Image (cartoon, grey):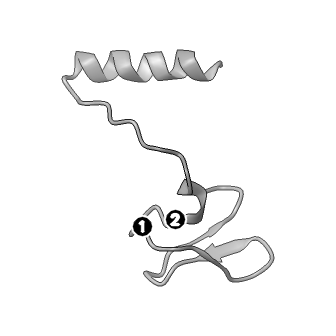
Amino acid sequence: MPFRRLQFYIEYKAHLTRLEVVYVDVKHTSSLCPTCGGKLAPKEHRILKCECGFEADRIGI
């Protein structure tokens, strides 16, 4: 599915349920923890970790 179409569907569904859609600048988002916003550091070959305890595969973030 093209990105813009997915974006339209999310905006449409949010409007139906009266939710606000907030756009986030994508700069540096792949290096930040999704839980606390801290800096992710490499733990093993493909695993990233954060000081808060969050761990994930770098592909899945």
Residue 31 in the image, given as x and y percentages of width and height = 59, 64
Q: CA distance from mark 2 to mark 1?
A: 5 Å
Displayed quadrant of residue 23: top left
Position of residue 54 in the picture relative to residue 61 (left or right): left
Q: Residue at x 65, y 18 (%)?
A: 2
Percent position of residue 49, x then y: 58, 78
Horizontally, residue 16 falls left or right of residue 1, namely left
Classify residue 28 by image quadrant.
bottom right
Q: Residue at x 75, y 81 (%)?
A: 44
Res 22 quadrant in image: top left
User: Which label number is shown at residue 12?
Assistant: none
Q: Nearer the viewer, residue 18 or 27?
A: 27
Residue 32 - label: 2
At label 1, counting other C-alpha atoms closer than 10 Å, the crowd grade (few under 14, some 14-19, many 20 or more) is: few
Numbered circle sitting on residue 37: 1
Q: Horizontal placement of 26 versus 9: left or right? A: right
Amino acid type of disc 1? Gly
SS state under label 1: loop
Q: Can you name the residue that lies furthest to the right here? A: 45
Image quarter in which the N terminus is found? top right
Q: Quadrant of the C terminus?
A: bottom right
Mark 2, secondary structure of its residue: loop
Q: Position of residue 60 (x, y in %)?
A: 65, 55
Q: Dots 2 and 1: beta carbons under 8 Å?
A: yes
Residue drawn at point x = 46 percent, y = 61 percent = 34
Q: Is residue 59 above or below residue 14?
A: below
Structural crowding at the residue carrying mark 2, measured as other residues with C-alpha within 10 Å and reported as few (<14), some (14–19) or many (≥20): some
- Looking at the picture, does residue 6 appear above or below residue 35? above
Q: Is residue 61 above or below residue 51?
A: above
- Report the residue that reaches farthest toward the left: 18
Residue 3 position in % (x across, y down) = 60, 23
Which amino acid lies under the numbered mark 2 shown in the image of this protein?
Answer: Leu
